[in-house]
Amino acid sequence: MRPSPASPTAPSPSRWATELYGLLPLPQLGEGQERQPVSDLPAYCGPENAMTEAEQDLLPSGRRRISSLEMLDIAKQFPGVLANDHVYFDVRSGEVHALLGENGAGKSTLMRILYGLYQPSSGQIKLNGQPVEIRRPSDSIRLGIGMIHQHFMLVPSLTVAENVALGLPSSQGPLTDLRKVSRRILELAELYGLQVDPDVPVWQLAVGEQQRVEIVKALYRGAALLILDEPTAVLTPQEVDELFITLRKMAREGHALVFISHKLHEVLDISDRITVLRDGRVVGSKPTADTSKAELARMMVGRELAAPGERTAGGAGSVRLDLQGISALSDRGTVALRGVDLQVRAGEILGLAGVSGNGQRELAEVITGLRPATGGQVLLGGEDLTGATPGQIMDRGLAYIPEERNRDGMIRDFTVSENLILREHGKQPYARAGFLSFRAIERICAELVRSFNVKTPSLETPMKNLSGGNVQKVILARELSRRPEVLIAAQPARGLDIGAAEYVHQRLLEQRNAGTATLLISEDLDEILALSDRIAVIYEGQIMGEVSRESATAEQLGLLMAGVGAEGKARGARS
Ligand SMILES: Nc1ncnc2c1ncn2[C@@H]1O[C@H](COP(=O)(O)OP(=O)(O)OP(=O)(O)O)[C@@H](O)[C@H]1O
Ligand SMILES: [Mg+2]
């Protein structure tokens, strides 16, 4: 890292921060704890020196706390983008500091700098008041910094213990004592109230469980400061509650936490302070108690959000998608779908609510030809397409927004425009008589990038350089612009900032009004209730019930999602 040259007249960073952002009250400490002034704290030292420090300075894991971490005047220039524009950010022991901002605002970049994955173009990082050099993740791990990424980094075929031990210097060679690793995992799990089984292979774990493994892995490596980059995007509401219990406990015990999310209610719920980034710059930083959803939205987007789009009366069209008794197996070979009957008509949105892992992914894959059905039929516009290839099905006018967009929806090394025309490049207007029409491609792609507000330096930028939310926008732009007859949209707003989510919802309503039959698969009840004409609930591979938009309530849907049927009895569908 290249520190910026010291200037004798420049105010000290902490005074500079105080003047810029106002004096921020320190977060609450537990009873009987006293906060030391930052300047009086000794420089960071590893666990080997920890015994010489006061007991209260230790975390349950045995590591020393990080009293304060400051990022001073951080800039990061990528080709064509200033991703971080002289950012000040700090986090202290005992608090959750949330980082908010639109897609591409620079949140992940700032945190990757802190974790040593990127080098800043300029700026300085101070830990407990002392400048530190973070050149690579091993440096940040040594300093007590851990990170849970936007996309998990576990190896599915290895066990939890093997994943935790992976890459540690102590676990290289054939002498890794996995029993010792397992024992320590169980110890940490107990200390932090996390349920983790060290001996299970990771592929058998639900997403929420995998995330717990990531947290234990970071604690195992001695994280006193934990960065969580959109940890809730892939979690069910219940898993979010469990994660928050863990995070609160960690903060109470003295960890410093950075939390990134696009969901304002989560940020207001879990954080002590909030910093908002826009176009790489800090727009503001506030104690959570002193702000509101409306103010945060304004700070992030720079405008008020529009009201939801117009809806005309719908549902009167003919049946476009007809699922008759669909059954299918999961990847693990267990029964995932048990005789699913659903009809979606032209001009309506059928919301499929349910806790993830109840067959939604398998259902979308059967419809789109990516997974064989073990029973039943898929009719598209009256034509039986059971067993047809994905290409044949897409050619009949079906568009698909997959849940795992990074895996199933794009090619990372292709450019933005190549990804935009991925499905249609052989057809008019992109190609004529077998030749690509580059003028048409560029014009149409530029228009899509503009209308979906995709933040990218150019159409030729590889997809892998886009921020998480902007990748989502490219896939949405491609699928929605095909003006499909039938649209399967799985978690369409996941990972999008509030402005982009609002735009996508408007587009879904527009398409519905124009006659598209849409199956909206979502775990977000607010999204389901806002967009659907009818709502079906899936539980353990079966449809638990169907309700109209007018009569649906969140409580009723919640009960159906938990497997409690109309008769008030829990359904034991598992055979
Ligand atoms: N490796 C890279 N190479 C080039 N540009 C990059 C790279 N990583 C990020 N960028 C650019 O930096 C900017 C900030 O991206 P970043 O991932 O930090 O955004 P973000 O705030 O995390 O957004 P999101 O909410 O979508 O995850 C974006 O314009 C992005 O395209
Ligand atoms: Mg990001």
Image: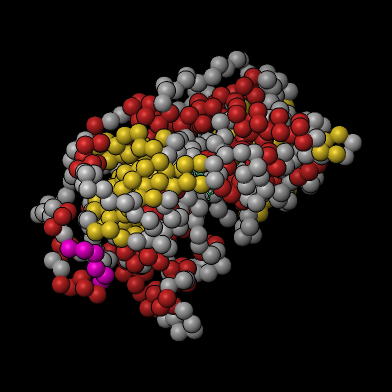
Give the colour scheme shown: secondary structure
Question: Could you say which quadrant of the image residue 253 lies in?
Answer: bottom left
Q: Position of residue 237 (x, y in %)?
A: 42, 43
Q: Residue at x 71, y 29 (%)?
A: 443
**Nearer to us in this view, 559 or 40:** 40
Query: Percent x, y for residue 327?
Result: 68, 48
- Whether 199 is drawn above or below 448: the answer is below
The residue nearer to you, when weighing 129 against 189, is 129
Residue sitting farthest toward the bottom: 175
Q: Is residue 484 left or right of residue 508?
A: right
- Percent x, y of residue 363: 65, 44
Name of the residue lying farthest toward the front? 8
Image point 24% across, 31% down: which residue?
Answer: 290
Q: In which image quadrant can residue 168 be found?
A: bottom left
Q: Percent position (x, y) of residue 369?
A: 74, 46
Q: Residue at x 26, y 48 (%)?
A: 7
- In the foreground, 2 or 132: 2
Q: What segment carries the magenta color?
A: 42-47
| Left or right: 393 in relation to 27 | right
Q: Is residue 95 visible?
A: no
| Location of residue 47 with respect to 531 vertically, above or below | below
